[in-house]
Image: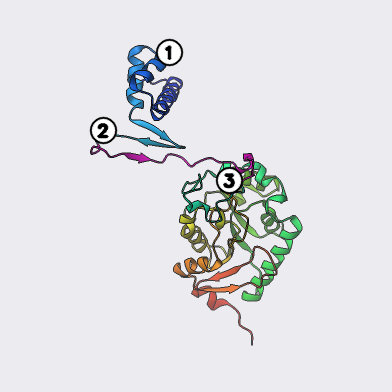
Amino acid sequence: MTDDPQQQELLTMLVDRAARRFTQGATQAIVVQELEALGLAANMADLLAKKASVTTVCDSHTITRRDVLPAGHTLIELLQEDPINPSDMADKGFHPYGTKWWTNPECPFAYKYLCLDTLYAPSYFASEGTGHPTHDKAQELYQYMQRIYAGLFGKRFDNIIELGTGGGEITRHFFEDKVDVLAVEGTTGGVEKLLQLGIAPHNVLKRNLKFMENLNRKFELCMCTEVAEHIEPWFASKVVQNCVDHADVVWFSAARGDYRPHYHHINEVPIQAWDNIFAHFGFNYYIALNGTMGRADRVYFNAASAARIQRTS
């Protein structure tokens, strides 16, 4: 209708507005009148109303109807993830729908793919009160990881890929101890926190784990701890694939379903569920860690890495 970008943006906004009025029950004549009241010429109002009549908005997603479809059928295009911010809620994201809320039809956010940057706003990374380890606890975990790895393979690990970085304190210990770390984080707030902690930009990769590509690089160790429960259940295999694509040894933990239900935890399941997914990808071996340290449930291995483990009599 126009080549001017600003006018095109305005017309798009008007079409979206008109489409919402159709979903609210307005007739074609009423929508045309309302567009004319906004200052549009009659022919333009009629044109935009016709365009809007084949587009309806449902929640945060756009449903587009095409006349070429068989009668009674609708073509649906999911254009964006649903933005919710638990910190803006009166209950701060705690709710009564249970830890399986994502597949509970009574929950208003069931089955919806949620926007990372609103679900995990910058405030989520601002303090240690959101479940992220403190500097000292992160240091204890890092030293424990090196002890376990050295006990298995006779040497410390010198490089690692960390999938999901949370508050960034664990990443900081990798970086400060000269471990070559690639910190993969999907949220804008999380990436900003890493940079604030002094992590070099070339050690940070912004990727949503639901869509992460194979980087065609192998690390001595992949770490994915207390991350998988934050991703919709149907992406569980994708999370595991991200791990096994990039290392033959995976340090893993995830919430098991004993937390108070919260929108941040979309997929709490027993660790045995993850055992079977890793086995599906050829990581048939694991060591169950002794539970004295948080963020340390399993170390998974494929056959090649299991063969490298030092066995003492």
Q: Are discs 3 and 2 less than 8 Å apart at CB?
A: no
Which residue appears at 66% of the width and 55% of the height?
171
Magenta span of residues: 69-93
Q: Earlier in the sequence, mark 3 or mark 2?
A: 2
Badge 1 amino acid: Ala
Spatial CA span between label 3 and label 2: 39 Å
Horizontally, is 94 left or right of 279 in the view? right
Instruction: Kindly tell me whether residue 309 is visible in this rendering.
Output: yes
In the image, taking residue 18 as reference, residue 108 lies left or right, namely: right
- The disc placed on residue 129 is none
Graded by Cα atoms within 10 Å as few (under 14), some (14 to 19) or many (20 or more), the crowding at tag 3 reads many
Residue 260 percent location from the top left of the image: 63, 55
Q: Earlier in the sequence, mark 1 or mark 3?
A: 1
Numbered disc 1: secondary structure: helix
For the residue labelled by badge 2, is the local secondary structure a helix, a strand or a loop?
A: loop
Instruction: Please determine whether, in this image, residue 14 is positioned above or below residue 118.
Output: above
Give me the residue at 61% from left, 51% from top.
203
Q: Nearer the viewer, residue 6 or 201?
A: 6
Name the front one of labels 3 and 2.
2
Residue type at tag 2: Asp
